[in-house]
């Protein structure tokens, strides 16, 4: 069984696939994830590309509430596939982290996808709570805190 940090990575990677599917970052995402999932096997790479294209087709065809359900289902599927990859090949962690960072850097700053209480963002994310609510999040990367537009404090 995977440790929590690797499950979080798989979830973030799954969200990255879903988020990139309808952006200009898609081709790099499709190629990168297919290569990573195939582990050098051309048949596995072709299967991964097929599954990635099916994901993109489902997301581009869906609208409204159906789009939200499709995003959630696809993110869960990719989280499972990528968690399986990490469990079968622990050495894939570094490559997956690098790929996720590469794709997220290509996403438009305004793109944010939230599913199953997780968020993948191509830019800044503000978390807030109102009316006595509580807001919490787990962030797997550098964090800048502060009140915009003032300077932030870098935490790692």
Image: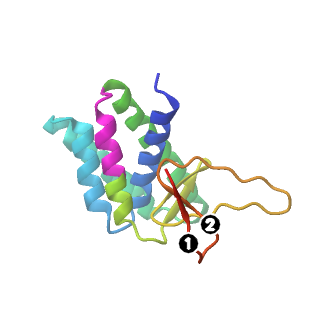
* Residue 156 in the image, given as x and y percentages of width and height: 49, 50
The numbered dot on residue 57 is none
Q: Residue, x 85% and y 62% (percent of image)?
A: 131
Query: Looking at the image, which residue is at 53% across and 65% down?
Result: 63
Q: Disc 2 marks which residue?
A: 146
Q: Is residue 38 left or right of residue 22?
A: left
Q: Count residues near mark 1 (Cα–Cα under 10 Å), then give few for <14, some for 14-19, many for 20+.
A: few
Asked if the residue at tag 2 contacts the one at tag 1, i.e. Cβ–Cβ closer than 8 Å, the answer is: yes
Q: Residue 94: say if magenta.
A: yes
Answer with mark 1 or mark 2, whichever residue precedes in sequence.
Answer: 2
Left or right of 15? Residue 128 is right
Depicted 115 relative to depicted 127: above or below: above
Name the one closer to the observer, 112 or 91. Answer: 91
Q: Position of residue 1 (x, y in %)?
A: 47, 21
Which residue extends farthest top?
1
Q: Which mark is residue 151?
A: 1
Considering the numbered disc 1 on the image, is that residue within a helix, a strand or a loop? Answer: loop
Which stretch appears magenta?
89-100
Figure coloring: rainbow
| SS of the residue under disc 2 | loop
119 lies left or right of 54: right
Residue in front for this viewpoint, 90 or 30: 90
Q: Is residue 42 magenta?
A: no
Q: CA distance from mark 1 to mark 2?
A: 7 Å
């Amino acid at each position: 069984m995977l440790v929590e940090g690797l499950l979080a990575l798989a979830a973030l990677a799954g969200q990255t696939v879903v988020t990139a599917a309808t952006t200009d970052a898609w081709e790099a995402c499709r190629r990168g994830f297919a290569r990573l999932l195939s582990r050098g096997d051309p048949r596995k790479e072709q299967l991964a590309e097929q599954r990635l294209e099916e994901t993109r087709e489902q997301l581009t065809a869906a609208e409204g509430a159906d789009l939200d359900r499709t995003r959630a289902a696809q993110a869960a599927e990719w989280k499972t596939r990528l968690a399986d990859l990490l469990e079968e090949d622990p050495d894939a962690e570094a490559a997956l982290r690098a790929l996720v960072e590469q794709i997220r850097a290509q996403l438009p700053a305004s793109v944010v996808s939230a599913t199953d209480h997780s968020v993948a963002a191509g830019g800044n994310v503000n978390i807030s709570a109102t009316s006595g609510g509580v807001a919490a999040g787990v962030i797997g990367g550098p964090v800048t805190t502060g009140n915009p537009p003032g300077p932030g404090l870098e935490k790692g």
